[in-house]
Image (cartoon, rainbow, N blue to C red):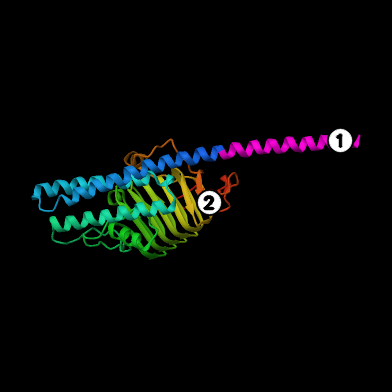
Amino acid sequence: HTGSSGGAVKMQERLQKRHQARIEDAERRKEANESRAVSEENKYFFSTFYSELASIEELLSGCSGADRTTVTQNLEEATTRTAQLQKFLNDNLLFLNPYDLKKAQAALQKLQASLTASREEFLPKKKFAFRTRTKAADKVPVQAEDAAPSPAEAGSTEVDRAAAASAQCGFSNISNDCVTKTAEEIQKQDVLLTHLTNCKVRLFGSPSTLHLKHIDGCEILCGPVSSSVFIDQCRNSTLAFPCQQLRTHNTTDTQVYLHVTSRAIIEDCHGVGFAPFTWSYPTLEEDFAVSGLDRQRNNWSQVDDFNWLAAGVPSPNWTVIPDEDRRKNWDT
């Protein structure tokens, strides 16, 4: 009787092992398929990206020795196509690993610098800069025209310099203040907020991109951002914005009220909470229309953590903010 019982146990163990082996084999096949899909996506991205990059560089080299009309046309076309290439890179952030992303950004930054240098060389202008100041606290400097535009991500010193150079719009080095930008001031521009402490910031309208860097103890509310929001070195803050893509680095103890049409990405973060975007103001619907974001598509709770690769186990670095803890009133 005991022998019969032992045989049944062994049979059960064999069946269990076989079942487990089947599950593991299915998971391996699934991972291989997913990896193949990402690889195909990468191949398409690289062939398209670098082919277009070379084509724009060729366009710029055609400025040498050409008449002014041709130079103007070439530079206009190169500027438009470089902006489209930037958008193409932004649209493919999710498929690129950090190394490939940095490489593509560096190539794009070099192209942007080359475009600016060509404009300076072939169509020189008298350098001047002016703008209106709506608040004494508005301290982002306007740079000379030879500064390169900002690339896709505020993650390195070079990128910070480029972002600061291109940002005609934003706030910098402010503590304990309430500051605002109107829709007319920021419409379709890159907005840069850097080195802010204990501030309340309201950004109305639809920026092209939003860069947040060195933010501590702030509340930052922004209208719909047509492409990407990049956050680096942020802590103890509350943020609210709609956007196409979100990349967050080195951020701690921060709540994000989000409307995002792709997926949010975090890296080197902890204590980050997410909830749906709930801030409202009179021209919000108009600004959504300007941004081109899909009002019906919000992946606020779909967050990819680049530091957490355990399949099927939620990342400990971010949470969904419980409904009872979410901000209901933004005016107080």
- What secondary structure predominates along the stretch shown in magenta? helix
- Residue under pointer 1: 5
Residue 143 at what x, y percent from top left?
A: 24, 62
Residue 311 at what x, y percent from top left?
A: 58, 45
**Vertical placement of 196 versus 17: above or below?**
below
Residue 51: quadrant of the picture: top left
**Vertical placement of 86 versus 296: above or below?**
below
Position of the N terminus, as image quadrant, is: top right
User: Going by the picture, which residue comes out furthest to the left?
Assistant: 67
Q: N-terminal of the two: label 2 or label 1?
A: 1
**Labels 2 and 1 touching (C-beta < 8 A):** no
Stretch of the chain drawn in magenta:
1-28
Front of the two marks 2 and 1: 1
User: Which label is found at residue 273?
Assistant: 2
- Res 209 visible: yes
Q: Secondary structure at mark 2?
A: strand
Residue 29 at what x, y percent from top left?
A: 55, 37
Between 142 and 204, the one nearer to me in the picture: 142
| Mark count | 2
**Vertical placement of 214 versus 12: above or below?**
below
26 in magenta: yes
